[in-house]
Amino acid sequence: MPEMLVGMEQEDVDIPSRRVLITGATGLLGRAVFKEFRENNWNAVGCGYRRAQPRFEQINLLDSIAVHDIIHDFQPHVIVHCAAERRPDVVESQPDAASQLNVAASANLAKEAAGVGAFLIYISTDYVFDGTSPPYKETDVPNPLNLYGKTKLEGEKAVLENNEGAAVLRIPVLYGEVERLEESAVTVMFDKVQFSNKSANMDHWQQRFPTNVKDVAAVCRQLAEKRMMDPSVKGTFHWSGNEQMTKYEMACAIADAFNLPSSHLRPITDSPVVGALRPRNAQLDCSKLEMLGIGQRTPFRAGIKESLWPFLIDKRWRQTVFH
């Protein structure tokens, strides 16, 4: 009997035969994607740039030779391309750099993926739509309002032109286990919620669908595994949480989850005048993936509690939150 157990333990150390390469693996989404694949018996390699070492390969995606080399050395079956400049206001202020990363690097990655027969999943955004007639299906005509949406849409086109077997996955505003609160447009509100001694204006105009990165990661893996069995799985897909909330409503839900007051939060119902234009409601219709049996949704309250728990300032609340 003991001999058999030894043999079984040996099995576990085999490196899984399915290989996935994740770009932007140091970012909020990339970390979750890396973890999801690794925990489901894939051999995952992550690459990043500024925050890469020691855990991930350091690759500048604008260096086409470095990109070629890692793809040819590792020979991935799947590449999940999470890396992007995703801050709309930064894209407006640095359009050339943003276009290099969001468009040129994506086109090159698509070519390299095609060269080794890898299935590329390009992560895109609900901001390709103008938000005037939701919900949006994959077949609806995009009309991005800001430069971020435009560069991501150009990235989609570049990917599909250079790799006809690739997939585009459009997703909305993300949150999850952050390293810093600023990493997500959802978690960044936590300080305003916690400092209840000063009133805070919160957008109550734009309709959002906060989506947990763990759920997006699960969708990427399910899509990859479905594709391994069925080559017709390609093209454009949508995934999103299904709870509609403005930032004001998210902030109130966060306060509620931690038993914190929310009376200092002020809903602002006018459309914002500063920064890049935002779509009013770019709700994504996710039925195409659902029909494939793909999907996962974490309820917002559960997901946000898990994400923000380490950033709770007043530790006395911990008693009331969890007991």
Image (spheres, rainbow, N blue to C red):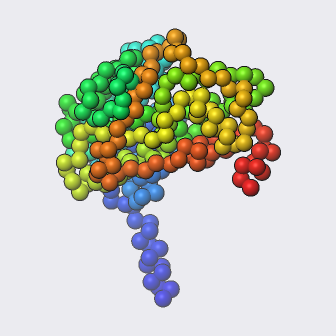
Examine the rendered structure and indicate whether residue 89 appears above or below residue 291: above
Q: Is residue 306 left or right of residue 172?
A: right
The residue shown at (29%, 50%) is 291
Q: Position of residue 113 (x, y in %)?
A: 26, 40
- Nearer-the-camera pick, 134 or 319: 134
Examine the rendered structure and indicate whether residue 112 appears above or below residue 207: below
Q: Is residue 38 left or right of residue 187?
A: left
- Nearer-the-camera pick, 276 or 287: 287
Q: Position of residue 206 (x, y in %)?
A: 49, 24
Question: Does the rendering let one see residue 220?
Answer: yes
Question: Does the rendering let one see residue 59?
Answer: no
The residue shown at (37%, 60%) is 16
Q: Is residue 247 left or right of residue 263?
A: left
Q: Quadrant of residue 120?
A: top left
Q: Quadrant of the C terminus?
A: bottom right
Examine the rendered structure and indicate whether residue 44 appears above or below residue 238: below
Q: Is residue 146 left or right of residue 229?
A: right
The residue shown at (28%, 35%) is 138
Q: Quadrant of residue 305?
A: top right
- Nearer-the-camera pick, 292 or 42: 292
Q: Position of residue 260 (x, y in %)?
A: 73, 38
Q: Quadrant of residue 63?
A: top left
- Nearer-the-camera pick, 39 or 141: 141
